[in-house]
Amino acid sequence: MREKRTFEEINEKIKDGSVVVCSAEEILDLIDRDGEEAVFETVDVVTTATFGPMCSSGAFLNFGHSDPPIRLEKLTLNNVEAYGGLAAVDTYIGATAESKDRGLEYGGAHVICDLINGKEVYLEATSKGTDCYPAKKVQAKMTLDDLNEAYLFNPRNAYQNYAAATNGSTKAVYTYMGTLLPNYGNVTYATSGALSPLLNDPELRTIGVGTRLLVGGAVGYVAWNGTQFNTAPVRNENSTPIGTGATLAIIGDLKQMDGQYITPAVFKAYGTSLNVGIGIPIPILNRDMLRFCAVRNKDIETNLIDYSVPSRSKPVVRKVNYEELQSGQIEINGKRVKTSPTTSMRKSREIAEILKQKIQNGEFFLQEPITFFAQGQKVKPMANSEVLE
């Protein structure tokens, strides 16, 4: 009877074709049918996934040099501002950057996805001119194939958990969680629940810097902990965080991505975001990892927050679990209220299945983290701030 496994042993099984893989939803059915002990003896890897808006996303691009060369100090792509404070022809474009002529309906997320989908993107750039970079203005049309490098680098993705949103005021509220109707008219939420990556490894025992994953349908990696990283949240008895929890910084090659699993999103009166598909394999190294991967939606709680309150500390209306949220209705003050996800469960399941098939086919090997993340880290508010308007 085996007590533990290693990454190396699991990769050997992937290599010889004997690995046993199931999704985080499938493992629940197996446990119900066969019991935890039998599942631990047979299952090597659990695949997890999520697909939803992740505003803290963007891409680094390198255009190559014009002749004569230019240092891109101010630039736009399809009239969306990109960052010019890097080396001469490098830039970073953020997903939420807005078009100068199309406003909230087109932004950096669209530029990134236009590139992935093979469309031409129009570059305009200016510079003061220097001896080594004498050109002062350039324009060009280019596709992804014309770029030297193009890689996604997302500072904050795959929130471990996230608050659900509602609106207790008498008028509609427009947010990155979607439109919230007045008088608690609806509830939105943003996690794939029991299928979500970091909810299946709540203590980050197998996920760290270097973890190999799928992002946008392509192989990518965890580059660092994500911003607003919180490994000291309130947790329930299963170690599952209630509220936000940890995040991941993700990197991946734009040239390998599939437009089905990375798409632009537009939220009314808020702006653009990027729907990012992420799939992470969780190795069942020991019984603790099986117990973590056996988490069920009824055991994952989050806070339902009133987004109508213009304060960093918004009031909690109630606690709610994901079984309730995914049922399509919850109760608020004795009233049945409709719920809807910003996360696509259909695409999350597709990604988990694609990752499963790749592992079973010997096309995807697990990467043990180079280093693990610090525990006990909390999110701090903006220091010494004074809101002026």
Image: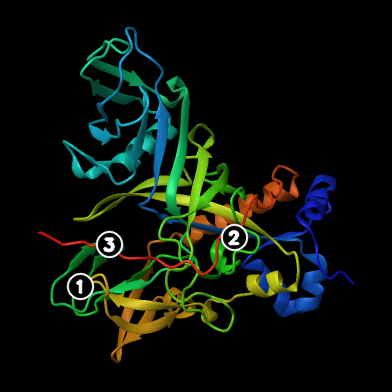
Image height check: is 333 above or below 30? below
Q: Residue furthest left?
A: 389
Image quadrant occupied by the C terminus:
bottom left
Residue name at image x 82 percent, y 54 percent: 9
Label 2 residue SS = strand
Residue name at image x 22 percent, y 31 percent: 79
Front position in the image: 210 or 216: 210
The residue singled out by tag 1 in the image is 308
Q: Residue furthest top?
A: 68
Front position in the image: 50 or 336: 50
Tell me the CA gap for discs 3 and 2.
Answer: 36 Å
Front position in the image: 228 or 332: 228
In the displayed structure image, the side of residue 212 where residue 75 appears, left or right:
left
Label 1 residue SS = loop
Q: Position of residue 292 (x, y in %)?
A: 64, 72
The residue singled out by tag 2 in the image is 48
Label located before the other in sequence (1 or 3)? 1
The residue singled out by tag 3 in the image is 383
Viewer-nearest of labels 1 and 2? 1
Per the rendering, the mark at residue 281 is: none
Image quadrant occupied by the N terminus:
bottom right
Q: How many marks?
A: 3
Name the amino acid, label 1: Ser
Q: Residue furthest right?
A: 1
